[in-house]
């Protein structure tokens, strides 16, 4: 009987009752796993045992490796069960727990990652931290067997020392959590330009992005560069942003057949990705490519956005309307197997003549086009498009309008063939914050492409989250899977969803989205706001098991919660005319004066909000029937331009008076006699109505 057979016949542990796919992956381990909660904590206190906390997520390659090597090993599991209380956490379900113990891990080791392996006292204070441990000594890494033995021995023989160290580390974590907002101060108009100058020092001028490897396709710096370049006319800022996006769109980090983007590139060329696909990456990248297209009009950018939206619509959308979390890096136990090709495989599907064309375009080599220590990668190729050595653009060769349709047909053939392979695992839980990001992206896509599918997807997801992910008290919940919604929502969930609803209003102009966004903003204040500090906490403070409350101001894979919350407040102030919202957003920015003074590399999204807060507000009202082609022509002019710190509203004849209760800027905004009129308002003053697209274009571009 194989190890897999044992796993399927063994009695499941408590994780079988969880909804998280990641936790359920461990339900047949011989380890006596507990989910994070009072049952585990009480057992640790009662038996005076340390807690072994293992944190990971479903798409994590090394999490799968550690499970196969250690958590499926009966001898290792026996030691774990005898000497520890073992707790499994899905970091995507509980980012609050993950943040606390990742901070401790970074403090202890100087680096971190997943799987995260932390040993805690029964009162949940960390005293020994690690990440992946092999089952036996390997490559200079301590074996998990030895770590378990050493920690158990220290707990039994040096208890007082362990408790003292745990108390000190927990204190440092709490101090770090409280100090992240930095020193408050007056907003400085040059903060954005100084941050851009700091980015330029570290920019990879050949491959785009920041120097070095691995490379992450983070959107915040690019959005800041677009704002700065567009607002000041700085060509270098625009060049850094657009060249980075071109390189990402051409690289192996992009799925050139199925659309969407992988998590990150392990090299500095965007060639070899870590093959997992995360919803939050694809949501942010789709939106960023659209914004860059609005600045440049470059077709490659908008194509990459559309491919990404189509990927999510096809492969990551639940029947109920929400969007799934991720697709795994692995299939059939091998990372990237689903996405890689040999030249012979391509030739067998396309035929020799077309294969020559395709392989030239996507740099497919007879012996493979990347190096790897994994033997199963030998001869395999990652589809990508080569850039010129000087970084100026795509190398000459196959491509262009004359072959674009033909290449698209070849990609479709290969995608059909690829779909016959064993797919990577799907994490089908629905996360409120990530869905907020995706709602924003689909709303933007609907504006640009005028594709009803995108608008329907955004609406359906928003309605689903607002109805299904609610607690008994009416507050948001964070996750939904297998018909169950659970876990208190965090700051990110409220803020990201509110941002998505505001973008959705600017797409279909249904005032209900404004009402819902305002309700979420009220909840932000009630649950997360600290009046003394002028910032939002990540958590509400209702969970006694959390030993620290963090103030999220630094961007990670997702924008910081304070950045998105401040942006929501600024936009609500514009929509409602209530300046208190804007005053509160400015307090968040002022509280981060110290972070901006350090250069702002980790605060790009907050700096985007700062840029918008310091610019004159601009509100645009289109008065006309939303179904009229003349109205749509006016909206098309607006939507094809990059207009930060600008909001757009629609005064629909017959509806505007009622909508003005929520949107006072609609009051007295009437269409022209023979068609729509556009009112551009700035500094509390509205200009004369514009009644044709040419006049609107002249004002916006003048």
Image (tube, helix red, strand yellow):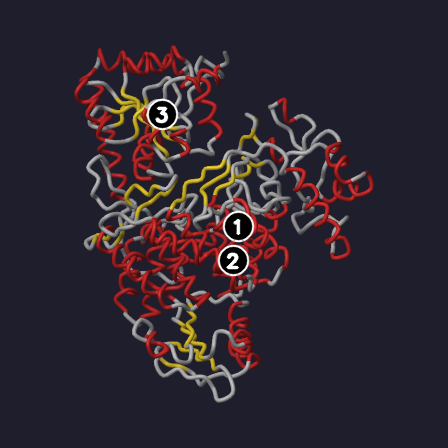
Point out residue 70 in the picture as x, y percentages from the top left corner: 42, 17
Q: Secondary structure at mark 3?
A: strand
Dot 2 falls on a residue whose secondary structure is: helix
> How would you rate the neighbour count of disc 2 (Cα within 10 Å): few for under 14, some for 14-19, many for 20 or more?
many
**Number of marks in the image?**
3
Camera-side residue: 459 or 336? 459
Q: Residues within 10 Å of mark 1 (few under 14, many from 20)?
A: some
Label located before the other in sequence (2 or 1): 1
In screen coordinates, is 411 left or right of 438? right
> In the rendered image, is residue 684 in sight?
yes
The answer to whether 131 appears left or right of 661 in the picture is right
Q: Disc 2 and disc 1: Cα gap in Å?
A: 8 Å
Element under disc 1: helix
Q: Are marks 1 and 3 in contact (CB under 8 Å)?
A: no
Residue at the image point whose x is 32% and y is 16% from the top: 80
Give the residue at mark 3.
117
For the residues labelled 1 and 3, the Cα–Cα distance comes to 35 Å
Vertical position of residue 145 compared to residue 552: above or below: above
Which label lies toward us, 1 or 3?
Answer: 1
| Residue assigned mark 2 | 454
Q: Residue at x 69, y 41 (%)?
A: 414
Residue lying at the far right of the rendered structure: 353
Residue on which the image places disc 1: 313
Q: Do labels 2 and 1 touch, CB within 8 Å?
A: yes
Say if 581 sits above or below 481 in the image: below
């Amino acid at each position: 009987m194989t190890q897999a057979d044992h796993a399927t016949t063994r009695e499941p542990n408590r994780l079988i009752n969880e909804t998280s796919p990641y936790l359920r992956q461990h339900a047949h381990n011989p380890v006596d796993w507990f989910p994070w909660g009072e049952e585990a904590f009480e057992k640790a206190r009662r038996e005076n045992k340390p807690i072994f906390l293992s944190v990971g997520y479903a798409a994590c390659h090394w999490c799968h490796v550690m499970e196969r090597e250690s958590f499926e090993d009966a001898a290792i599991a026996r030691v774990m069960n005898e000497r520890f209380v073992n707790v499994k956490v899905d970091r995507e379900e509980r980012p609050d727990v993950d943040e606390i113990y990742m901070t401790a891990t970074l403090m202890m080791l100087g680096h971190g990652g997943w799987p995260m392996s932390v040993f805690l006292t029964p009162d949940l204070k960390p005293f020994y931290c690690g990440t992946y441990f092999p089952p036996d000594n390997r490559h200079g890494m301590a074996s998990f067997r030895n770590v378990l033995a050493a920690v158990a021995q220290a707990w039994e023989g040096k208890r007082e020392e362990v408790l003292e160290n745990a108390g000190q580390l927990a204190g440092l974590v709490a101090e770090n959590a409280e100090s992240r907002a930095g020193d408050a101060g007056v907003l400085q108009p040059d903060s954005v330009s100084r941050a851009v100058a700091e980015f330029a020092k570290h920019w990879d001028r050949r491959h785009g992005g920041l120097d070095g490897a691995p490379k992450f396709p983070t959107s915040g710096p690019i959005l800041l560069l677009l704002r700065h370049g567009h607002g000041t006319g700085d060509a270098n800022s625009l060049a850094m942003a657009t060249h980075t996006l071109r390189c990402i769109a051409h690289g192996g980090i992009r799925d050139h057949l199925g659309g969407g983007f992988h998590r990150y590139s392990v090299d500095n060329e965007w060639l070899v990705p870590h093959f997992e696909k995360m919803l939050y990456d694809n949501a942010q990248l789709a939106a960023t490519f659209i914004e860059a297209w609005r600045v440049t009009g470059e077709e490659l950018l908008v194509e990459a956005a559309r491919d990404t939206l189509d990927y999510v619509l096809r492969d990551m959308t639940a029947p109920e309307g929400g969007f799934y979390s991720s697709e795994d890096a692995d299939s059939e136990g091998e990372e990237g197997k689903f996405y890689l090709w040999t030249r012979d495989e391509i030739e067998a599907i396309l035929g020799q003549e077309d294969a020559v064309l395709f392989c030239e375009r996507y740099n497919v080599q007879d012996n493979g086009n990347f190096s790897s220590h994994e033997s199963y990668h030998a001869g395999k190729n990652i589809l990508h498009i080569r850039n010129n050595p000087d970084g100026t653009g795509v190398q000459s060769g196959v491509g262009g309008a004359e072959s674009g349709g033909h290449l698209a047909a070849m990609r479709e053939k290969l995608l059909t063939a690829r779909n016959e392979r064993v797919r990577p695992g799907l994490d089908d839980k629905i996360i409120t914050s990530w869905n907020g990001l995706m709602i924003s992206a689909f709303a933007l896509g609907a504006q640009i492409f005028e594709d009803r599918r995108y608008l329907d997807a955004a609406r359906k997801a928003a309605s689903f989250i607002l109805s299904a992910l609610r607690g008994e008290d009416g507050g948001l919940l964070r996750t939904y899977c297998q018909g169950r919604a659970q876990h208190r929502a965090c700051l990110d969930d409220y803020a990201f969803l509110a941002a998505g609803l505001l973008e959705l209003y600017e797409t279909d102009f249904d005032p209900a989205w404004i009402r819902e966004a305002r309700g979420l903003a009220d909840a932000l204040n009630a649950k997360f706001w600290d009046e003394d500090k002028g910032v939002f906490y990540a958590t509400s403070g209702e969970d006694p098991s959390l030993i620290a409350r963090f103030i999220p101001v630094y961007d990670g894979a997702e924008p910081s919660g304070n950045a998105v919350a401040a942006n929501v407040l600024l936009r609500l102030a514009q929509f409602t005319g209530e300046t208190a919202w804007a005053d509160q957003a400015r307090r968040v920015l002022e509280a981060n004066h110290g972070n901006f003074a350090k250069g702002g590399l980790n605060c790009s999204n907050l700096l985007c909000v700062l840029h918008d807060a310091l610019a004159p507000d601009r509100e645009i009202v289109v008065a006309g029937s939303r179904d009229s082609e003349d109205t749509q022509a006016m909206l098309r002019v607006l939507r094809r331009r990059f207009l930060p710190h600008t909001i757009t509203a629609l005064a629909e004849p017959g509806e505007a008076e009622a909508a003005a209760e929520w949107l006072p800027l609609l009051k007295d905004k009437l269409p022209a006699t023979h068609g729509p009129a556009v009112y551009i308002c700035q500094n509390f003053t509205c200009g004369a109505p514009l009644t044709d697209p040419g006049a609107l274009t002249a004002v916006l571009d003048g």
